[in-house]
Image (spheres, rainbow, N blue to C red):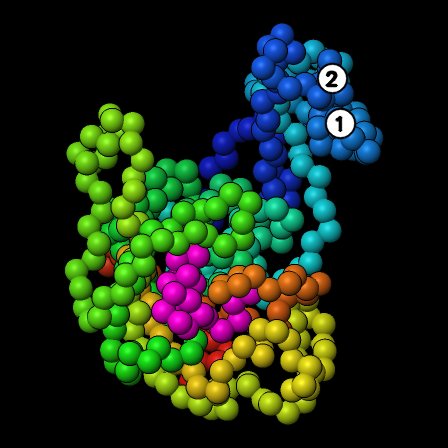
Amino acid sequence: MRRVNRHLKPQPLPQRNGVDAVSFVLPDAANPADDTFGAATVLDYLAARFYPHARPLFEERFERDEVKDAEGGPVAPDAPLVGQKIWYYRQLGQERPVPFDMPVLYEDEWVMAIDKPHFLPTTPNGSFVAHTALVKLRVRENNPLLIPIHRLDRATAGVVLFAKTPEARAPFQTMFERRALSKTYEAVAAPIPELGVGDSMTVRSRIDNAHGQLQVAQTGVDFLPGDVPPLAPETRAEKRKRHSANLPFTGLNAESKITCLATYPRQDAEAWQPSCNVSQNSAGVKKEHAPEILSTTEQRVPSQLAHYRLEPHTGKTHQLRVHLAAAGAPIIGDVIYPEVLPPTETDPELRLQLLARSLSFTHPITGEALTISSKRRLTLAPH
């Protein structure tokens, strides 16, 4: 029988359908450095900053007593701005549901692993809140304390771990921070000329998030053939010395091992049919397409494909996607690398061919050796 934890931790406002209330520190009107948007009261400020053309959205929150202070007391709409912290429920927009399941791959008293589908975000972010793995699992498992230990991109499918209690979160996150586990991914891309079947190479680089950009910034790319020792992480002593000198880390921070498992012609990939067919997008809507009107991502599929095993030794944003793109083999179905494709109203017909296949680690609480593997397969992977 599966176990469900219900150790509730009180908050000023409880979760609503798996969604946490948000907290916000208001400006102090007496501080000239704080921007009050010309407002003198809490309601005026919230409306002016977030909904200048829809003030009733916040007025209704106050009427329903859904704006609380840090101690859980009610906040009056005409309360002055004194730098206080408040809690309220965010306004949810229209979200397109992802009609796929999230089977449980492993579960014990402390942690749960699920098999995330493509197109489902791991956590609330931007326009996705209710239709995220975290919110859906909290409701389905009747556990408001679930929290992800790591994340996958919305476009990536596969194994994701969730802590079931606040106490379990720290030891598992420490395991990730210390790289005390093995992560294996699979991808389909064009063949890399210098990488034969069974051959491996390691890609190292520096990856930095670029503010306001979909793509990350990558510099110092290096390709190392064969098996090489992992890039040594910065030691605590080195980090303390750098911090004491107020210096940023400027070395390489991303490393991935790429192994070619197979190469094969495109027509051998299951579900790739050059004749007209009917398929479903992530919204469950059927659509017909013929070869001459294939989507931009589908037009990118080369005549020869390669199936790769990817082993990231670090966990930077978009790491595997930029490393394969740097090797001249961007992942099939990628709408961000090597260049950003124009957005569409629905998700791409061809899913990103990237799958988080497995996690292997020693359970930080029980000491048990575990390997958790996804049951999914990539559309264009060989049989």
Between discs 2 and 1, the one toward the N terminus: 2
Q: Are marks 2 and 1 in contact (CB under 8 Å)?
A: yes
Q: Nearer the viewer, mark 2 or mark 1?
A: 2
Residue 171: x and y in percent read: 30, 42
Please check the rendered image and state whether residue 330 is part of the magenta-colored stretch, yes or no: yes
Query: For residue 47, which numbered disc appears in the image?
Result: 1
**Residue type indicated by callout 2:** Ala
Which residue is depicted at the point 28% across and 83% down? 197
User: For the view shown, which residue lies furthest in the front direction?
Assistant: 220
Does residue 380 appear left or right of residue 109 in this picture?
A: right
Horizontal relation, residue 187 to residue 293: left or right: left
Which of 373 and 382 lies nearest the eye of the viewer? 382
Judging depth in this view, the residue of 33 and 277 nearest the camera is 33
In the picture, which quadrant includes the N terminus? bottom left
* Count of residue discs: 2
Give the secondary structure at mark 2: loop
- Residue 73 falls in image quadrant: top right
Q: Residue at x 29, y 73 (%)?
A: 259
Which quarter of the rendering shows the C terminus? bottom left
Mark 2–mark 1 distance (CA, rounded to whole Å): 9 Å
Residues in magenta, as a range: 318-335
Residue for badge 2: 39
**99 with respect to 149 (left or right):** right
Label 1: few (<14), some or many (≥20) within 10 Å? some
Q: Is residue 53 in view from this perspective?
A: yes
Nearer to me, 310 or 10: 310
The reply to whether the magenta stretch includes residue 314 is no
Q: Position of residue 190 (x, y in %)?
A: 42, 78
